[in-house]
């Protein structure tokens, strides 16, 4: 299991472990992974096993990032534009949500941003609304959880946590966040 975790660049689901270790029950697989996880933490190693997007993945310890940056001499993080982050927040908190609902909250056309986020695999079409015209509804993907290091959507910060940010934003931004609620 440790070798699989090490060699994979994506979280591995219990079901995927089960395909390899068919003689083990899911509870036994989880127990083994938790033991490995504890061992890494106890020995204060530079790698940890974390639960992300419903699976498990090996990651480097955050407080060693400066050494990794020096080693690789580059910072590889994809940055989202403000419109993309706004749209992504709306989808994450209001999903499933239509493009028209996104546009009514943001106050601008969202076609390009929605298509870009879809192309990146961060959001997806998750169905159709029963309203006239049967518009597509959008939801976040597993890749969204992986990118933000979340086990599930329940780990998203609560909207109340943003209250201090809201008070410092302009009225336009205030209305956008209120519309998300």
Image (spheres, rainbow, N blue to C red):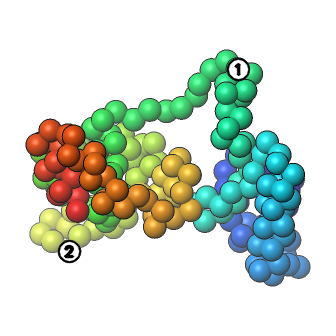
What crowding class fits label 2: few (fewer than 14 Cα within 10 Å), some (14-19), or many (20 or more)?
few
Graded by Cα atoms within 10 Å as few (under 14), some (14 to 19) or many (20 or more), the crowding at tag 1 reads few
Reading the image, the residue beneath label 2 is: 130
Left or right, 39 with reference to 166 = right
Residue 132 falls left or right of residue 114: left
| Towards the viewer: 134 or 114 | 114
Q: Which of marks 2 and 1 is in front?
A: 1
Residue 25 found in image quarter: bottom right
Q: In this view, does 84 lie to the left or right of 144?
A: left
Q: Tag 1's secondary structure?
A: helix
Find residue 3 and report its horizontal and vertical position in percent.
Answer: 87, 53
Residue marked by disc 1: 70
> What residue is shown at x 23% (from left), y 58% (from top)?
180
Q: Residue at x 67, y 38 (%)?
A: 63
The residue under the point 31% across, 52% down is: 162
Q: How many marks?
A: 2
Q: Say if mark 2 contacts mark 1, CB within 8 Å.
A: no
Q: In this view, does 93 lie to the left or right of 175?
A: right
């Amino acid at each position: 299991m440790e070798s699989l975790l090490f060699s994979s660049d994506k979280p591995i689901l219990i079901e995927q472990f089960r395909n390899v270790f068919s003689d083990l029950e899911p509870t036994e697989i989880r127990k083994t992974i938790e033991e490995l996880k504890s061992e890494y933490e106890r020995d204060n190693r530079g790698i940890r096993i974390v639960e992300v997007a419903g699976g498990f993945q090996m990651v480097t310890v955050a407080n060693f990032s400066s050494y990794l940056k020096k080693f690789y001499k580059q910072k590889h993080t994809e940055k989202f534009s403000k419109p993309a982050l706004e749209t992504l927040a709306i989808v994450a908190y209001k999903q499933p949500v239509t493009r028209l609902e996104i546009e009514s909250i943001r106050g601008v056309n969202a076609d390009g941003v929605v298509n870009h986020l879809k192309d990146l695999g961060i959001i997806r079409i998750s169905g159709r609304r029963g309203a006239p015209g049967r518009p597509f509804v959008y939801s976040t993907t597993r890749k969204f959880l992986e990118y933000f290091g979340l086990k599930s959507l329940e780990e998203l910060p609560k909207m109340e946590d943003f209250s201090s940010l809201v008070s410092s934003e302009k009225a336009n931004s205030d209305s956008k966040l209120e519309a998300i609620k």
